[in-house]
Image (cartoon, rainbow, N blue to C red):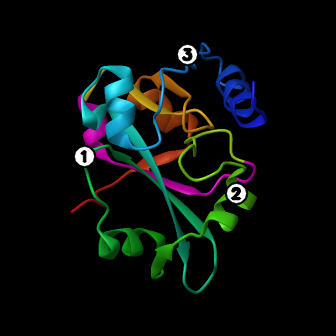
Amino acid sequence: MSKSVTRVARALDAAGLPNTITEPGEARTAELAAAACGCELDQIVKSILFAGQTSGALYLFLTAGGNRICATKASALAGEDLGRADAGQVRVTTGFAIGGVAPIGHLAAPSTWADPRLLDFDTIFAAAGTPRHIFSIAPRVLMSVAHATVADFTE
């Protein structure tokens, strides 16, 4: 098991949650993950990281697979203008490569917000550290473990 997947498994264990990590196949995009899991697109949690243009801090937005992030709303939540975080910055801060960024198990946890659309489901699926591994979880449980604040940041 990769170090990244192991870190997600440890985060689940530390939260007292079952290890639901599976390797259903290619899950690099929300569309591929939904097909691999046999679920609705919006049941896939996209972990999108932005960098503060002033502070350089990373901010994590957990959004439903079919939604897009509104830059203006996201910047208002972060309190500064945001730009896409580069792959190197994502790897150093979270420990994950883009395409497999999990919402939990980061090396340094960024400020995190969650899309209310995720609450429409009993179970959601998120990356577990690689583009091929996912885990299932109840939305409110994920938001608690990820220390995410539910907020409107989508278009």
Instruction: Name the amino acid type tagged 1.
Output: Gly
Q: Identify the residue at image location x=74%, y=26%.
A: 10
- At label 2, which amino acid type do we have? Arg
Closer-to-camera residue (128/131): 131
Image quarter where the N terminus lies is top right
The residue positioned 36% from the left and 41% from the top of the image is 30
Numbered disc in front, either 3 or 2 = 2
Q: Is residue 123 visible?
A: no
Dot 2 falls on a residue whose secondary structure is: helix
In the image, residue 97 lies at what x, y percent?
A: 64, 51
**Residue located at (40% from left, 39% from top):** 45
Residue behind mark 3: 20
The answer to whether 140 is drawn above or below residue 89 in the figure is: above
Left/right of residue 118 with respect to residue 100 in the rendered view? left
Among numbered discs 2 and 1, the one appearing first in the sequence? 1
Dot 3 or dot 2: first in sequence order is 3
For residue 86, what is the image quadrant? Answer: bottom right
**Residue 146 in view (yes/no):** yes
- What crowding class fits label 1: few (fewer than 14 Cα within 10 Å), some (14-19), or many (20 or more)? some
Labelled disc at residue 66 = 1
Q: Are marks 3 and 1 in contact (CB under 8 Å)?
A: no
On whether residue 111 falls in the magenta region, the answer is: yes
What is the crowding at mark 2: few (fewer than 14 residues within 10 Å), some, or many (at least 20)? some
Image coordinates for residue 68, horizontal then vertical, percent: 28, 58
Would you say residue 113 sits in the magenta stretch?
A: yes
Kindly report the distance in space between the C-alpha atoms of the residues bearing marks 2 and 1: 25 Å
Tell me how far mark 3 sits from mark 1, CA to CA.
Answer: 23 Å
Mark 3 or mark 1, earlier in chain: 3
Label 3 secondary element:
loop
